[in-house]
Amino acid sequence: MHAAEAANYALVATIILLAAHVAQLLVKKRNRQGPRVAEPTSTFLENAAPVLIVFASVTGTTRALAARLRDALAKEGRTSIVVDASKPQLDPWDELLNGDSKDCAVLVSTVHGGLAPEPSRRLLVEELDDIAADHRVGQGALRGRRFAVLGCGSTAYDPKVFCTPARICEKTLRKLGAARVASTRLDDTEDSEAMYAAWEKRVVSAFSRPQIRGESKARKTIPKVSRVSDSSDDEEAPKKSVTDVEDMGAVLGDKEDEVKTKGPKEMTTPSQAKALKKEGYKLIGSHSAVKLCRWTKHQLRGRGGCYKHTFYGITSYQCMEATPSLACANKCTFCWRHHKNPVATSWKWKADSASMIVAEAVKLHVAMINECKGIPGVLEERWREAHTVRHCALSLVGEPIMYPHINDLIGELHKRQISSFLVTNAQFPDAIRTLRPITQLYVSVDAPNKVDLEEVDRPLFSDAWERLRESLVILREKKQRTVARLTLVKGSNTGDMAGYAELIALGEPTLVEVKGVTFCGKSDASDLTMANCPWHHEVEAFCRELADQIRRDHPQCPVYEVACAHKHSVSVLLARVDQLKGPQGWNTWIDYDRFHELERAYTETGAPFTVQDYAAPCPGWALLGAAEDGFDPTDTRMYKKKANGKSR
């Protein structure tokens, strides 16, 4: 044997002997310590401090899930303290660092730009980051503590910032030495109930027993195969997320389901469909809906019509409220639909035919009219007339102009002699540009500047402000009636009159509708209160000032004057003098039969027509300042009794 080989054998033998000696020492040490006895679960639950459940919510999702987690832990005998990060009653980080609590669950939503909700941002991101950066605390300050993170967001926004606050929070807690027991990201464009249930099960299981040795170590992971990420330590590359091993069964099941359902998917998830149906929506196909408006029922009983009756002469009890797209590109703070509908920036679902949607919408609407016969006070003649739909308000929920066959749908309405009132949120300028003539086109102008627009509309598009401005420029090219619709929210979007004037001058719409926001009751989806709702006289004053501002700042722009008002709706109408004011007064009403004649000629021969061609005189009771306050005198106004017994 060569000398070199002998030396190698000797070295190997020495290493083996050393390893054996170290192993013997470790066994002796473990024997001296005795076997590790786990604390009984019952004793642990009796002595354990409450679990800290911290949530940050925008539309109420994480608030509701935090309550569910609290109840689930309570069933297992574990108490909890739920902390709203926007207004915490205690500092959860101080409690984890210096208090008795050892377990914490963080549920955080995501807002525009991939940020945590503004009121909660300081606690969830900045304060936690300050602790991690404080050399006096140390990176192992939370060793021995356990945490779970649930992120809620939407990949309809920029996928690169999907659930960023949850990822940052998780990374910081792990940096401080806390042990992660569960982490999941929920996407509100998908039905994520199963994902939440799996997360909750892991959290409850972990927090219902003592911490075990090795729990603070990083969990084994494998490449993600689901559309919903489960955790990631790489803050710069959120797309490379991973899935916990115990989730693989559910994940693979999801993958199999995706394979079975090839092609475009349904727009609404089962939970969204359930929520919409619960609120009275009649769903049509996979992405459309119809609902009976309360003003339809009011006018059926002879108790007055909506503001469109006052401003434009529609018959409220012959008006159908519908939408061909439940999805929207905004999550407006004042949306009275409470965000139970999907969101998206483009159409990615299967599309039902326009003829089917219109036929089914009319059928369902008439069925709801039939059900109204038993309502006390319904007038027989109006009930019979209501079976003939004459108007369609495409403003139910979502963004109707997203529907890829919107022009076909409008054509189907017009074939049935049904007028079209379409409201768009101005996020799809190309669709507005190619839109065929309709009875009246609305563009929502929800804020006078970019900062306010992002705060009020919470848009999915990062260039929402630019899209609004482009849409208004396109509006100027339309020959038929156009409307800029302003919804005033006190303390939010009412302070920049010059900004509104500039936008109106940009689009030169036929009409400017200004309405005070309606308080529709408390909702987790919005923090609006009655204090945000303007009084009618405040809306009147706003309109007069807006008309003056346009005249001063934009002398080249058409002159606007206050024309009509509907006090019940806290709504006031500005109209262009050059288009709708004649020698006998205002002509804001519409000759619907004439419109259909003109539209049919346009379809057949391309003959153009303009606003004035189908304008009709407005009655005196509809004008601002009239004693009737915009209430049709042929009806009987009913006054509700206030709590103090007085009527209004």
Image (tube, rainbow, N blue to C red):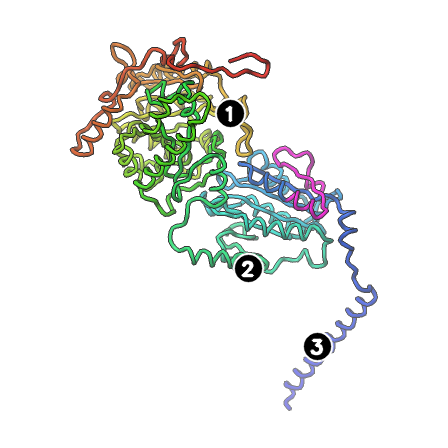
Query: Quick one: quadrant of the N terminus?
Result: bottom right
The region drawn magenta spans 69-96
In this picture, residue 473 sits left or right of residue 56:
left
Callout 2: helix, strand or loop?
A: helix
Q: What residue type is labelled 3?
A: Ile
Give the class, few, some or many, for how many residues have Cα within 10 Å of label 2's Cα (few <14, many ≥20).
few
Callout 3: helix, strand or loop?
A: helix
- Can you say whether 597 is above or below 642 in the image? below
Give the class, few, some or many, for how many residues have Cα within 10 Å of label 1's Cα (few <14, many ≥20).
some
* Residue that lies at the very extreme toward the bottom in this rendered image: 1
Residue at x-position 54% and y-position 27%: 521
In this picture, residue 411 sits left or right of residue 645:
left
How far across and down, in percent of the image, does residue 457 sit?
A: 45, 32
Q: Which of marks 3 and 1 is nearer the N terminus?
A: 3
Separation of marks 2 and 3 at Cα, in angstroms:
43 Å
Q: What residue type is labelled 1?
A: Phe
Tag shown at residue 519: 1
- Can you say whether 343 is above or below 183 in the image? above
Residue at x-position 74% and y-position 42%: 98
Q: Which of 120 and 287 is in front in this view?
A: 287
How far across and down, in percent of the image, does residue 216 sit?
A: 68, 55
Magenta span contains residue 40: no
How far across and down, in percent of the image, does residue 339 sit?
A: 48, 36
Separation of marks 3 and 1 at Cα, in angstroms:
78 Å
Q: Is residue 494 visible?
A: yes
Q: Which of marks 2 and 3 is nearer the N terminus?
A: 3
Residue that carries the numbered disc 2 in the rendered image = 249
Q: Which of marks 1 and 2 is nearer the N terminus?
A: 2
Separation of marks 1 and 2 at Cα, in angstroms:
45 Å
